[in-house]
Amino acid sequence: MSEQPLVGIVMGSKSDYDVLLPAIEILRALEIPHEARVLSAHRTPEQLSEYVETARERGLQVLIAGAGGAAHLAGVMAAKTLLPVLAVPIAATSLNGLDSLLSMVQMPKGVPVGTLAIGKPGAANAALLAAEILALTDTALYDRLAAWRVARAQEVLEQTLPE
Ligand code: RP5
């Protein structure tokens, strides 16, 4: 997107991209400027710090962190910023994302991480929650979000079952 990004999506590996795609698609659909980066809390700690520490001055307002395994990414990011950090646990190990979920949701008191569901539903909801946060001060976005919600309800009402 050419506009100044408002939402920054960080994933621990390119292998997380497919799971985070629903978040990117929703941000696109709601016309929310965003950016996505691969940065790892343990493999690129300095670059991750630089990204998060400069996020606010670069205009970002919400951060989304997606990671698998021990998934310390979101907590490390939250430690470096007062921007809201929304976390998406990713099933990347034999524990199927439960490891990431517990890591993200069990942040010690004082440094919050808003943790969503494991996998693609969590990614989609992270984007929607980011949109709701931004819509607090953006009435045009609020209207787009309301229309999106109405469209989802309409989809359900139009569903038919076999005779
Ligand atoms: C985590 O380890 C990443 O977020 C990813 O979910 C997982 C596996 O990473 P790769 O081995 O695919 O790079 O750090």
Image (spheres, rainbow, N blue to C red):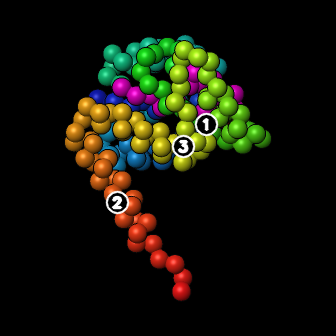
Residue at image coords 60%, 33%: 67
Q: Distance between the residues labelled 2 and 1?
A: 27 Å
**Picture coordinates of residue 161, whole percent (x, y):** 52, 78
Amino acid at dot 2: Ala
Q: Is residue 30 above or below residue 103?
A: below
Q: Quadrant of residue 155?
A: bottom left
Q: Give the range drawn in magenta.
A: 61-76
Query: Is the C-beta separation of discs 2 and 1 under 8 Å?
Result: no
Q: Is residue 41 above or below residue 155?
A: above
Q: Distance between the residues labelled 2 and 3?
A: 20 Å
Residue at image coords 36%, 26%: 61
Mark with earlier residue (2, 1): 1
Badge 3 element: helix
Mark with earlier residue (3, 1): 1
**Picture coordinates of residue 36, whole percent (x, y):** 45, 33
| Residue 119 appears in view | yes
Give the number of callouts: 3
Looking at the picture, tell me which residue is in the foreground, 112 or 124: 112
The numbered mark at residue 122 is 3
Amino acid at dot 1: Pro
- For the N terminus, which image quadrant? top left
Neighbour tally class for label 1: few under 14, some 14-19, many 20 plus, Cα within 10 Å? many
Q: Does the magenta stretch include residue 100?
A: no
The numbered mark at residue 151 is 2
The numbered mark at residue 89 is 1
Q: Work out which residue is located at the far bottom of the displayed protein and give it.
A: 163
**Picture coordinates of residue 113, whole percent (x, y):** 53, 26
Left or right: residue 116 compared with residue 69: left
Neighbour tally class for label 3: few under 14, some 14-19, many 20 plus, Cα within 10 Å? many
Badge 2 element: helix
Query: Is the C-beta separation of discs 3 and 1 under 8 Å?
Result: yes
